[in-house]
Image (spheres, helix red, strand yellow):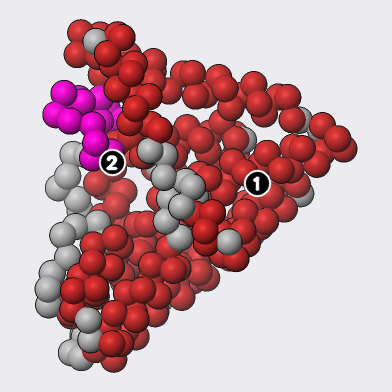
Amino acid sequence: MMILFSIVIALILERVLPQLVELRRFNWLSEYTLWLADILNFQRIGAWLASGIVLFPIILLIWILSGMFENALFGLFELAFNVAVIFFCLGPRELDTQVDQYLDAIDVGDAEQRFSSASRLSTQPPSMELSEQAVQVCKGIMVEANTRLYSVLFWFVVFGPVAAVLLRVIERLSQNQVLDETFVELKRALSVLLGWINWLPTRISLFSYMVSGNFDDGMQAFRSEASLSVDINEQNNELLQNVGYAAIASRVIVNDAQAMEVVRKARGLYLRSLMVWLFLLLLISVL
């Protein structure tokens, strides 16, 4: 029960203390990785070994801290540590706030701000055409909810703080724009690893989208999905986009009001899916 309590507290903190969200940028990862690369010459030792070298000290540190705080002071230190781990592994941005910013940009007719907000939500370069852009944002919400939220919570419940931190570090490094072309192989290896780690949470998210939205349309999209990508990470994202958007069962977008409506539907779907996830996580923690 403490695990679920930690999750609920972390989710509340994310919502009521948005200033703390700025602290979870993981900027230190770039400097840490560059420092190790200078010492060990990653190009010589290979991407997979380099990945293990980057991740191992972080895993070891969290494992030691987790052991130190376990049952300390009647469990209060353990609770505080768990809340801190979950909070800093979510995001890094708070999804609901970014959706609000996008909706506000549509409402006031600010095309520049709308494009900027869409860029932070969409998994691909957004279109300037509102109807197409809104669809991209909706699909991006489905992917981001799984990446920023559901997957972190799942692995935290299953394997504890070490798994949650490991997931977020791998995701941040695989998407890091500071690391230059000499780290392409390292980032590719981490992306593959992330794809396999997210494989199971992705399937659970698909189920949660279907039961929280239009089940028949979502199931039909799942059955008809035939990805041409060989990248498992891309396959996961395509499934989340297509099944999640199908579960909204929206009509064709022809004006600003309908664009806002479909984005609100996407947000509603991911929030209802969170309730499904919390119920499933409660069952997992009890078992």
Quarter holding residue 121: bottom left
Q: Position of residue 119 (x, y in %)?
A: 23, 62
- For residue 155, above or below residue 275: above
Q: Which residue is mark 1?
A: 83
Quadrant, the C terminus: top right
Q: Secondary structure at mark 2?
A: loop
- Number of callouts: 2
Query: How many residues crowd mark 1 within 10 Å: few (<14), some (14–19), many (20+)?
Result: many
Q: Chief secondary structure of the magenta span?
A: helix
Q: Which residues are magenta?
A: 175-191
Q: Please, is residue 169 above or below residue 93 in the view?
A: above
- In the displayed structure, 77 sits above or below 18; it is above
Q: Quadrant of residue 210?
A: bottom left
- State the CA–CA distance, disc 2 to disc 1: 25 Å
Q: Identify the residue at image location x=81%, y=32%.
A: 71
Q: Earlier in the sequence, mark 2 or mark 1?
A: 1
Q: Secondary structure at mark 1?
A: helix
Q: Amino acid at mark 2?
A: Gln
Q: Is residue 112 visible?
A: yes
Label 2 with label 1: CB-CB less than 8 Å = no
Q: Which mark is residue 248?
A: none
Q: Kindly identify the amino acid type of the residue bearing the numbered disc 1.
A: Val
Residue 100 location, x and y as percent? Answer: 40, 75
Q: Is residue 164 magenta?
A: no
Instruction: Name the residue located 46 percent from the left edge and 75 percent from the top edge.
Output: 268
Q: Is residue 186 magenta?
A: yes
Q: Is residue 201 left or right of 45 when viewed as pictured?
A: right
For the point 56% across and 31% down, the residue is 162
Decide: is 133 above or below 144. Answer: below
Residue 212 point in image, percent of width and height: 49, 71
Residue 175 is labelled as 2
